Image (cartoon, rainbow, N blue to C red):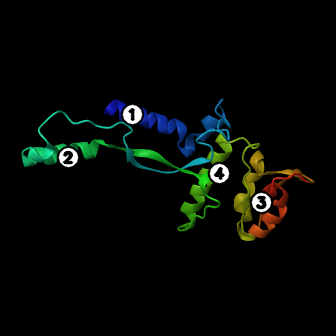
């Protein structure tokens, strides 16, 4: 059971590394490794928590659990329940299944989660396969100035004095207007 749990942990951390470890992925051959045909395309780690063990625990041959002495039966059930989950594994969300994601609650927590998600998306997905668009109120625009360095934020066909126009907007309607051709799937 321990080997299986450790293998599961290693596999999950490989697939969804800690946000602080993304720099090592970006500096490796794994940069932009997820393609649109991959099942993990668009997945982002959003938390850590307990998850089911990927193998089924099989209890030793005994009488039926209900025929065991009550203390033994209860101990067996507790043992199986306790060892059927692995604590502190990455929990991921597939963004492919949502047309939009809204984070609410504490601003600091929501911002940190957004930064971590954008970091993962930019690290694992090529700019040819995924565009990132930021919509931020004018008073929050400075918080998002750093995204201009991501190739994923460059408009596919529009240019300005600095090169490719950055897809950072102050309203959703402004973003939709600027991206109408991209959203419709036709080049300008």
Residue sitting at x 57%, y 62%:
110
Task: Give the mark, 1 or 4, whose residue is nearer the N terminus.
Answer: 1
**Mark 3 lies on residue:** 168
Q: Give the CA distance from mark 3 to mark 1.
A: 41 Å
Q: Nearer the viewer, mark 2 or mark 4?
A: 2
60 w.r.t. 87: above or below: above
**Mark 1 lies on residue:** 6
**Mark 4 lies on residue:** 118
**Mark 4 packing: few (<14 Cα in 10 Å), some, or many (20+)?**
some
> Can residue 83 be seen in the rendering of this structure?
yes
- In the rendered image, which quarter is residue 7 located in? top left
Q: Give the CA distance from mark 1 to mark 4.
A: 28 Å
Q: Give the CA distance from mark 2 to mark 1.
A: 22 Å
Secondary element type, mark 3: strand
**Mark 2 lies on residue:** 77
Residue 13, position in %: x, y? 49, 38
Residue 36, position in %: x, y? 67, 41
Residue sitting at x 61%, y 56%:
114
The number of callouts visible is 4
Secondary element type, mark 2: helix
Nearest to the observer: residue 98 or residue 141: 98
66 w.r.t. 134: above or below: above
Dot 3 and dot 4 residues touching (CB under 8 Å): no
Dot 2 and dot 4 residues touching (CB under 8 Å): no
**Mark 3 packing: few (<14 Cα in 10 Å), some, or many (20+)?**
many
Task: Give the mark, 3 or 4, whose residue is nearer the N terminus.
Answer: 4
**Mark 2 packing: few (<14 Cα in 10 Å), some, or many (20+)?**
few
Q: Give the CA distance from mark 3 to mark 2.
A: 54 Å
């Amino acid at each position: 059971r321990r080997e299986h749990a450790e293998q599961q942990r290693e596999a999950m951390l490989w697939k969804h590394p800690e946000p602080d470890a993304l720099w090592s992925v970006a500096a490796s051959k794994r940069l932009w490794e997820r393609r649109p045909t991959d099942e993990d395309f668009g997945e982002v780690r959003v938390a850590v928590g307990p998850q089911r063990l990927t193998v089924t625990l099989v209890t030793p041959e005994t009488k039926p659990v209900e025929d065991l002495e009550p203390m033994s039966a209860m101990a067996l059930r507790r043992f199986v329940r306790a060892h059927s989950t692995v604590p502190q594994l990455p929990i991921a969300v597939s963004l492919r299944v949502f047309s939009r994601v809204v984070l609410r609650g504490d601003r600091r927590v929501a911002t940190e989660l957004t930064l971590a998600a954008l970091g993962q998306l930019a690290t694992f997905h090529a700019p040819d396969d995924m565009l990132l668009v930021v919509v931020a109120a004018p008073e929050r625009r400075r918080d998002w100035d750093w995204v201009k360095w991501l190739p994923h934020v460059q408009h596919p066909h529009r240019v300005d004095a600095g090169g490719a126009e950055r897809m950072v907007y102050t309203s959703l309607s402004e973003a939709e207007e600027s991206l109408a051709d991209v959203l419709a799937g036709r080049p300008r």
